[in-house]
Amino acid sequence: METRGGFYITQIKQLQDRIFERLLVQNGIEVSGGQGRILFVLWKKDNLTISEISKETSLAKNTVSIVVDGMVRKGILERNINPMNRRQTIVSLTEYAKSIEEKYESVSQQMNTLFYRGFSQKEREEFEGYLERIVDTLILLETEQGN
């Protein structure tokens, strides 16, 4: 029997990314979706290492490093040496990044409303429960494989 769950998840992600980016631009926020994922993590807890951001976003360390470099060039983030461990770099929010948090959150809420249009509360909870089970299974598999 053919299953299409993975295909639908990929398609949803691609469509959602394009719509979300359009909403960001319409609201004057010049941040891509990937950059937004990193900002979201840093808004919750500032001053993290690349490894910590990678873990929180589920993005590969080299991907996080490349995206962070671009964000540093644009003045969105700063990189500083950890005074407690000179071999470690800490990534921090700039004043600009702090200033767009509320507007970004508003766009995220707008996207959430669009995403669940037509769903009852019960359907949304069931759907998210199924997705959470898939994520938990994949994290377990990745851990077992030693990644």
Image (cartoon, rainbow, N blue to C red):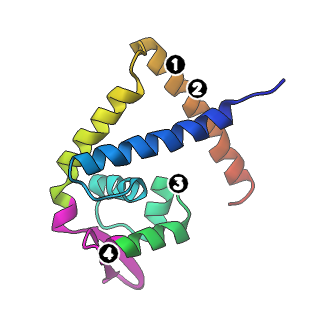
The image quadrant where one finds the C terminus is: bottom right
- For label 1, the SS is helix
Q: Nearer the viewer, mark 3 or mark 4?
A: 4
Q: Which amino acid type is marked by label 1?
A: Glu
Mark number displayed over residue 100: none
Residues at marks 3 and 1, CA–CA distance in whole angstroms: 23 Å
**29 is within the stretch colored magenta:** no
Mark number displayed over residue 58: 3
Residues at marks 3 and 4, CA–CA distance in whole angstroms: 20 Å
Q: Is residue 134 left or right of residue 1?
A: left
- For label 4, the SS is helix
Residue nearer the viewer, 102 or 140 = 102
Q: Residue pushed farthest right?
A: 1
Which numbered disc flags the more N-terminal residue, 3 or 1? 3
Query: Is the Cβ of the residue at disc 1 closer than 8 Å to that at disc 2?
Result: yes
Residues shaded magenta:
71-97
Residues at marks 4 and 1, CA–CA distance in whole angstroms: 39 Å
Which numbered disc flags the more N-terminal residue, 3 or 2? 3
Q: Which residue is mark 1?
A: 126
Q: Which amino acid type is marked by label 4?
A: Val
Q: Which amino acid type is marked by label 3?
A: Ser
The quadrant in which residue 115 appears is: top left
Q: Which amino acid type is marked by label 2?
A: Tyr
Q: Which residue is mark 2?
A: 130
Residues at marks 2 and 4, CA–CA distance in whole angstroms: 37 Å
Q: Which residue is mark 4?
A: 72
**90 is within the stretch colored magenta:** yes
Residue 78 visible? The answer is no
